[in-house]
Image (cartoon, rainbow, N blue to C red):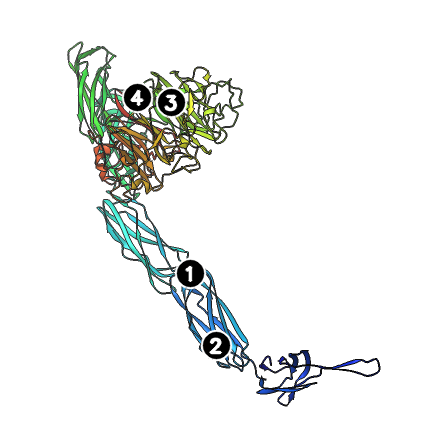
Amino acid sequence: MQPAAAYTSVDVPVHILGEHFEPVASQRVGRGGAVDVDSTFRAFLGDVELKDVQWQAPDRLTALVPAGLSGGPYDLTVIGPTGEGTFPAAFSGSTRRPAALSATLSAPARVELGTQAEVDLLLTNGGDAAAASPSVSLLAGEGLAVVAVPGAGARIKPGQTVHLVALVAAEARGSVPLTLDVTGRDAFDGEQIEAIASATVQVVSPAELSTATVPVPDLVSVGQSLDLVATVTNQGDVDALGVALTPLSVSGPGGAVVDSLPPPQDIPAGASRTFHVAAHATSSGAVFFACGVAGSDAITGGAISVQATWDIVFVQAAAQLSARWLTVPPMIAPGQGFTATLGVTNTGEALARDVAPVPNPPSVAVTAGSGSLTASPAQAPVDVPGGSTAVFSWTFSASGSPPASLVLSAGASGADANSGAAIAAGSVSSPTIALQNSSVLVASLSAPAGALRGDTFTATLAVTDSGGVGVNGLAPSLSIASGTGGAQVVSGPVPASQNVAGGATASFTWTCAATSNGAIALSATVAGTDAIDGSSRSATAGATVAISDAVQVAAAPLGASTTFAYVFDFNGRVYLGPSRDGTGGVRMLPDGSSPQPFTLAFQGDPVNGDNNASSTRPFPSLGSTNCAMDTIQCGPDNENGRGLFGSGIVGGTPWLIAGGARTNSVLSHVYATTDAGTAPVFSYDYVANALTSQTRGTSSMLVFRDRVYFGFADTGASRPTYIVLRKMPSSPGSTPVVGVDVANLRINQVSDVGSAGLVNRNTTQMQMIDSQTAFNDRIYLANNGGIVHSDTNDPQPPLAGLLPPWTVSTPSNALYVGKSSITTRKTLDIEPADKAFPQMAALAGRLYAARNTTSGPQLWTCVPGPDLLCDPQDWTLLAPNGVGDTTLSQFDDPQNTRVTLLAATSSRLYVGYNNPAGVVLYRSRAGLTAPSSRADFEGTAGCDASQAPSSCDGLGGRGLGAGATRIFDGRVLTYGKDYLYLTAGNGSSGFRVFRLVQ
C-alpha cells in the first residue's frame, strides 16, 4: 500500500498494489446476449472500510483512507469478484500535526573587513512529529565567507528549538546576503521538510585615518606665532572615536615651541576633522614638526593611528631697519638743484615690506642764515630683503640769501613681511649744506643705479664753474665710502687734469669694478685755482650704486599689459617681444640704455593664400590671444595666440624668426626677415604640407648648421610635429619644396617622445617639442615623454618601413623613472612652467636638462661615454634636495615649484625657479665646470646654495628685488663677455628684464 503511513486529518488517497485483481465477465442468455463485467472491489484496514475503491489494473487499485483513521499499522484486506486477500501491517495513520520546521537567522548588521563574526541560527519544529536527519546549510554572498556551521543533531523533537552559532569572515566591502537553508524528513511519514531564512550583513572597512597638514604660515620671523593645521580624514566605514594628536616633536636647525594641543574629536566614517596646534618660532633656521594621531574603532574598540608631518617651516631673524647715510653736496647755490640719497639697510633675515622714508622728502633745518630746500617725495614704498639696502633719492631745489647752512634729516618705517609687525629706522642727519653765492665749483657725480657683482661700471664727474672767470688745473679724485657693498677703482680719472671756462662744464671718468653685493657711496673731490686770482676752488659730489648679482635693465618696457616676452640678440642689440597685441616689441643696448620700440609686419601669401580674410597687407600683427578672426588683430593664418619669437644666424646672416599659434584649425606659415630696422617686414615660408591638420602652435626652435628646426604643439594622431627648414624665404615669401627645402622629420615615430613610437609610445593628448639643443654635433630634443638625439648632424625623414634616425636618450635612472613629467593642454601662450623640459644646456662637455615632474623639479646631467653621446645610463640627478623629497632638485625649498631656466655661459651653469614668494636663481661656482651637488652652486653674494633657502637666497634676492614670481624666458648673450638675460614678472603686470654677468 502506498503510502504506508499518512496523516489522516482528511481523506487520504492511496494505491493498493498486488496481483490477480481481475474483474469477472458473464454473458446473459437471451435479450441480445449482453456481457456483464463485475469489477467491484472492497478494501479494509482492520475493520475500517476504505472509500471509493476503484479497479485500475490487474495489479493496482486506488482508494481513499477515511479521515480520522489513527493508529496502526493496520492489516489490509481486499475482497474482489474472484476472492479476497490480506497484507499485514500495510498502513499507519495519524491525526496529529506533521513535523514543521521554521528557521531564524540573526546576524550582526555590520562586520568589519578582515574580522570574523558569530551568526545565531534558531531551528524550531512546530509539529507533533519529530524532524529527522536535520541538515543545516548557511550560504553567503560575495564578501563573506562561512567559516563554521555546527550540526543540528539526529532529530529535532516536536516543539523543540535548537540554537546554533555559526561563524563568518568578512572578505570584501559591500552589502552581503546570508541564507539559512534547513532540511529534514518527517519522522512519521518520511516526507521532506524545509525551512529558509535570510539576512543582510554590511561588510565595512574599519576606521582608517589619513592626514593632510599645512603650517600657516610656512615662513615666519623669530617670535611670530603660527598655526599648525592638521586635517584628519576617516577613510573607513566605521566611526573613529576620541581622535587626538600626540605631543609634537620639533626638530631642525631652527627653533620653535608648541603652545597648545587641540582636544580630541570623534570623526564619523568618511568625514574629516581639523585640528589646530598653536606654536611660535624661537630661533632662525628650518624647523620640522611631527606627531602621531590616535583614536579607536567604534565597532571593535581597537586602536587606530597615523603619523602626521608638516612641511618645512623656515624661521628668519626679524626684519630690522637702520638708516645708514643721507648724502648731500657740501655746497650749493640759489636756484641750483642737487640729489640727496638715503640708504636704509635691513640687518635682519626676513623681508622688510613697504619700507618708506620718514618724512618723505626729508625734513630741512636751517642752522644759519636764510635758505630753503624743496623736493618731491621719493618713489616709495619698496621691499628690502634681509641683508640688503634700499636707496631713496630726491632732487632738491635751493633758494634763499647766501650765506646759509642747512641740514636734512630722515628715517624710515616698514613692516616685517612675515609677522606684519611694524619696524622703524631712527632718523639720520646729513652733513651741513652751505648755501653760497655763485662763482664756485659745482660738481655732480653720476654712476649707474645698479651694477653687477664681478662687472665694471663707469663713474663720471661733471664739474661746472658757476661763476664767469673759469678755474684752471682741475684735478679730481674718487673714493669709495664704506657701505654694505664693495667696489674698487680700476682706472681713471680720464683726463687726469683740465681747465674749465666760466659757466662751462668739464667731465672726468673712472672705471670701477663691483666686487661685493650691497650699496656703495662714491665720493668725488675736484680742486683747481681761480683763473683770475689763483685762489683755490674745490667741489665734492657723491653717488650711490647698488651692487647685485642681478640688475634690472628694463621695467615694463612694452607697458603694463604685456606680461610676457622673449629675450634674444639681433645685430648687437637686445630684443624683447612680442607685445601683447603681437604688433611689435622693443630693443635696447646691452646695458638697457637707448630703448627703441619696433613694429612688426608680415607679408601675405599671394600664391597659397592666407587663412585671414582681412584685405590689409602686410599684416601688422602675428596675432594675440582672443583676437577677432579675419581682422588685422590676428596673424596671416588667423593666429590668435602667442607662439615663438627669436633669432638665429643662417649662412653668416642674422635672421629674425617667428612662428604663430592657433586655438584650432591649422598653421600654414612661419616667418623670417633680415631687416634690422625699427619696422621689419617678415617674409613667409609656406610649410603647411610639412605639418599635420592639428598642428596648433610653435613651441621651440633651434638654428643648427644653417638649418632651422621648429617644434610644434600638436593634438593629432601623428604628434608631436617637428620640421626642418633648409632654405630661408625670399621677399615676399617662399613655398619650399617638401622633402627638399622643408621636411617633417616624423619625430612622432620615435620611441618615448612620439605617439607612434616603436616602444614607450607617448599617449599624452597634446604633445609638443619642449626644448632643443645642439650637443657634440647632434640634436637633442625633449618633451614629456623623454629625451632623444639625432643619429647624424643632418637627420632625414625615415624611408618607408624604416625607423627615424633618432636614438632614445631618456635617463634610465630609477630616480627619473620614479617620477612622472608634467603635461599640458595648452597649445599657445606657453611658458617654461608649462613644459616638462623647459631648457637644456651644455657646459664643459656635459649636457644638462631641466625637468618638471608632477612632484616638483629635477635637474639632470649627462656625462657622455667614448661615443660622445648621451645614453640612458649616462644621466645622474643633479643637486638633489637634502631635506624633503630627496629625488627632486629644489635646493631644499618646496616653494620652488617649477624649474623655468637652465642656461650656461662659457664657465657657469645657471638654474632658475618659479616661486610664489619670488623667483630664485642659482649658478655654479666660479672655476667649477662640472657641478653635481647643491654645494657646487652659489646664491646672492656668493653664498653656499647648500644652505638655501634659510641662509642663502637666490642671485639678486628672492624675486630679483622686484616681486617677480615667474620666469618667462632666459638665455646667455655675449657682449664682450657672457651675460645672462631673462624676462620675469608676476603674470599680471608688465614684465621686467634682468641681466647677470658670469
- Report which residue position mark 4 lands on: 590
Give left or right: position of 36 versus 476. Answer: right
Residue that sits furthest to the top in the current view: 532
Closer to the chain start, of discs 1 and 3, is 1
- Report which residue position mark 2 lands on: 133
Looking at the rendered structure, the kind of residue marked 2 is Ser
Residue that sits furthest to the right in the current view: 31
Can residue 347 be seen in this snapshot? Answer: no
Distance Cα–Cα, label 4 vs label 2 = 104 Å
Rendered image: mark on residue 708:
3
Looking at the rendered structure, the kind of residue marked 3 is Val
Which label sits in the foreground, 2 or 3? 2
Closer to the chain start, of discs 3 and 4, is 4
Closer to the chain start, of discs 4 and 1, is 1
Counting every numbered tag in the picture gives 4
Looking at the rendered structure, the kind of residue marked 1 is Val
Contact, mark 2 vs mark 3 (Cβ under 8 Å): no
Distance Cα–Cα, label 1 vs label 2 = 37 Å
* Closest to the observer, 976 or 376: 976
Q: Could you say where residue 509 lies in the image, as x and y percent from the top left?
A: 21, 17
Closer to the chain start, of discs 1 and 2, is 2
- Report which residue position mark 1 lands on: 204
Q: Could you say where residue 82 lies in the image, as x and y percent from the top left?
A: 69, 85
Kindly state the secondary structure of the residue where label 2 is placed. Answer: strand
Dot 1: few (<14), some (14–19), or many (≥20) neighbours within 10 Å? Answer: many
